[in-house]
Image (cartoon, rainbow, N blue to C red):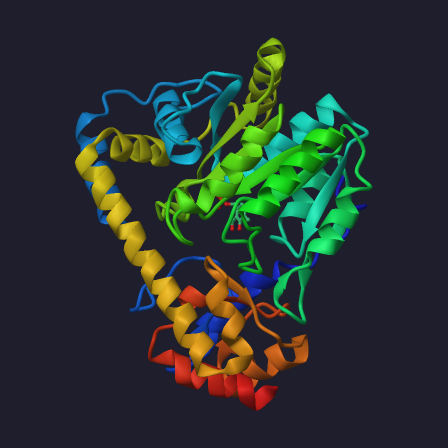
Amino acid sequence: MFQALQEQAPDILLQLIKLHRADPRPDKIDVGVGVYRDQLGTTPVFGAVKTAEAQLLEQQSSKSYLGADGDIGFVERLAPIVFGERRAISDGLWGLQTPGGTGALRLAADLIARANPEATIWLWTPTWPNHPPILRDAGLRMTAFPAYDVASSTLDWAAIENALSNAKAGDALLIQAGCHNPTGADPNADQWRRIGEICQKQGLLPLIDSAYQGLGNGLDEDVAGLRILVDAVDEAIITYSCDKNFGLYRDRVGALWVKSGLKRLEAVRSNLFELARAMWSMPPDHGAAVVRLILESDTLTAAWRSELADMRERINAIRAALSSADRGLSFIANQRGLFAMLPLSPEQVQRLRYEHGIYMAPSGRANLAGLTMQDIPRFVSAMQSVM
Ligand SMILES: Cc1ncc(COP(=O)(O)O)c(C=O)c1O
């Protein structure tokens, strides 16, 4: 059975974790792995999550099956955070719980492959390295287009418009909602409106991936573009991860919403059910129940919002400090989220690791939350020494 299998290259970021762990240097720095870290270098459980978990332990009377759509209360409570108070889960917008943002993306990919096997997915690059394999494994075709200009560290708007003008009706555009991974560069409101116009005019389905709401400028601010785009089109898919903004990474908490005409909604809904049922039958419950309990309680919601604000402020303080430490890094203050693309070659990244104990993805993507304020002078001078 297994003779024809080719060995696959190991995941670079997972390899980096191992190398960093084995490095004995006490002042080593890890900006490789994409998780939030506090000033002490830890990824703690939110206080609001701990309280909700204690309540869950106390109150949960059954672990019987829920259903392929998971905890509906979770989806209903999360929807206003994503789409705004004015929008209920009606008007052709329907959602279900998924195993993390990754599960939502895979479900979205399978739905598109079923609806239109000829679809091409237009891939805004660079992007999260797991996007292409998720789409590929669902059997979808992809066309990657450059959306970021490395020289100016800004979006390459001409390249984006040019690429999208070649999309055909029935294709989809995979676009991140905000705090872009890996560049930190997001469209502005006018650009979101223009993307909406293009999608609507050309029959291009926006597949909007939101994984970092609240880690940029604020909960509402970080999905302002998503809301503009959803309002501008008749059909859209939104995939969502609670794993960063609730710190629930390994509990795998996510959701998927579809916007479609009311006439098609039942067909969409039943296909999503069938696909989810065949893949994971039903999503893991614990993390979603925790998020629901937080969002059902005004006190816990306020605590969660405040913890998230502290994380955001820390990330933005690191951005400001890096940007003022070296003129060549000034672009970092204008971008948002955990990540920035540092102007480093793979060889320079390797030298940072060997000579300075600084661990980073070979692409130069750095998780800024991996730095403490005290690390910044050493980090910047190490970068300068290899450049
Ligand atoms: C852009 C993007 N989308 C989706 C995800 C998936 O998140 P999850 O851990 O919830 O599967 C990530 C995780 O790093 C991400 O960076």
Tell me if residue 8 comes above or below residue 265 in the rendering.
below
- Mark yes or no: residue 133 visible: yes
Q: Residue at x 55, y 90 (%)?
A: 385
Q: Residue at x 34, y 27 (%)?
A: 77
Q: Nearer the viewer, residue 291 or 76?
A: 76
Q: Is residue 211 left or right of residue 145?
A: left
The residue shown at (59%, 30%) is: 232
The C terminus lies in which quarter of the figure? bottom right
Say left or right for 63 vs 329. Answer: left
Q: Quadrant of residue 353?
A: bottom right
In this rendering, the answer to whether 136 lies above or below 328 is: above
Residue reaching furthest front? Answer: 190
Q: Is residue 76 above or below residue 194?
A: above
Q: Is residue 141 left or right of residue 110?
A: right
Residue nearer the viewer, 14 or 139: 139
Q: Position of residue 122 (x, y in %)?
A: 73, 42
**Residue 57 in picture, x, y percent from top left:** 21, 32
Residue 359 in sight in this render: no
Residue at x 49% of width, y 64% of height: 334
Figure quadrant of the N terminus: top right
Q: Nearer the viewer, residue 39 or 57?
A: 39
Q: How many numbered discs, if any?
A: 0
Indicate left or right for 104 with 296 as reference.
right
Taking depth in this image into account, of 195 and 136 the one nearest to the observer is: 195
Most distant residue in the bottom direction: 385
Q: Position of residue 19 (x, y in %)?
A: 52, 72
